[in-house]
Image: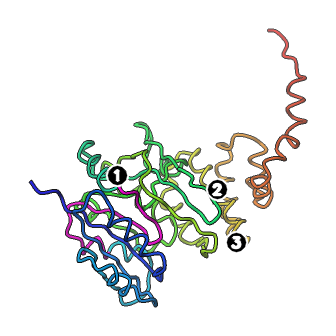
Amino acid sequence: MSSPLVSVIIPTYNRAAVLPRTLKSVLTQTYQNFEIFVVDDGSTEDIGLVVKMLNDSRIHHLRLHEHTNANVARNAGIRAATGEYIAMLDSDDEWLTQHLERRLQKIMEWGCDGIYGSFIRLGDDLRPCPRIARPRRDDESMPDYVLSGFVYAVTPSHFYRREAVLETLWDESLKRHQDYDFTIRFGTRFKFMCDPEPTVIVHWEKQVTRTFDFESRARFFEKYKDQLSPTAAVEYLFYQMYEAVFFKEPMATLAYYTGQLRALKIAINSRLNFFLSQHPHLYFWWRRHPAWHKFILAPRRAYNRCVIKQPN
């Protein structure tokens, strides 16, 4: 019986300098029955030359005529794939050598439709930092799980049956939270399992320009907010508010998040946190200066220690 063919989908836009590193991490896998689709999202750089230089017939260069976004490129690669399984990889990241072998072993062992999991983060001035994903609890909804933190369903860790992913595909209108959105939709419909062992390396480079894209984030939240528990919604909104200040978003963006948090006031677990939820810049300062917490909260803690409860 022949081993199943795996189709590796790598969307790229003007990353000719780092793409060889990514491709070599696939070519050196312990499992070798694969095809690779490098989906060129209308790059101005010569991605075809990078593919040609590696001289491997398993690598296919699929060029889109105009630049759109990574989700359009991902879907184009998924539709072109012929493998029984689909493995996703971003063009600036890489896999450890056993990634495909372990994914195939686990998807058959667990009888699931897809797998995602942990990764190792590398940065310009950072030591390797493992990010270990936690499995979903039986009583946990997929939206709550994805937005609860420590899930890390990063795209380069995704691996699924081709038939399942063709029924899901990526939302081509989202520029942010597309991985959250896909994971929720796929995991709600199919059996999507977490593998805590990190076999993916995600490169985080400071010089890469990133945008906030409030429209995509707000549309994502409006899509799922009725499915979220109050606790998960509050946690998500606090984090978005923090990022909005970090990216110097306009006051209208901050007002959206403070308004949503005001509606969830009863779920915010302290007066201080509610106050901070209505003052985004103070919340940003609070998050950025944790050393000040003990001084600011010291009077309250001292008062609590002095209060002597009377016996009944």
- Lateral position of residue 11 relative to residue 311, left or right: left
Earlier along the polypeptide chain: callout 2 or callout 3?
2
Give the residue type at disc 2.
Tyr
Is 145 in the magenta? no
Q: Which residue is mark 3?
A: 249
Q: Which residue is mark 2?
A: 239
Q: Which residue is mark 1?
A: 115
User: How far apart in space, not on screen, are marks 1 and 3 (Cα)?
Assistant: 35 Å
Give the residue type at disc 1.
Ile
At mark 2, the secondary structure is helix
At mark 1, the secondary structure is strand
Earlier along the polypeptide chain: callout 1 or callout 2?
1
Residue nearest the observer in this picture, 269 or 181: 181
Give the residue type at disc 3.
Glu
Q: Which residues are magenta?
A: 76-97
> Residue at left 56%, top 60%?
122
Percent from the top left, x then y, of residue 164? 26, 59
Earlier along the polypeptide chain: callout 1 or callout 3?
1
What crowding class fits label 3: few (fewer than 14 Cα within 10 Å), some (14-19), or many (20 or more)? Answer: some
- Lateral position of residue 112 relative to residue 282, left or right: left
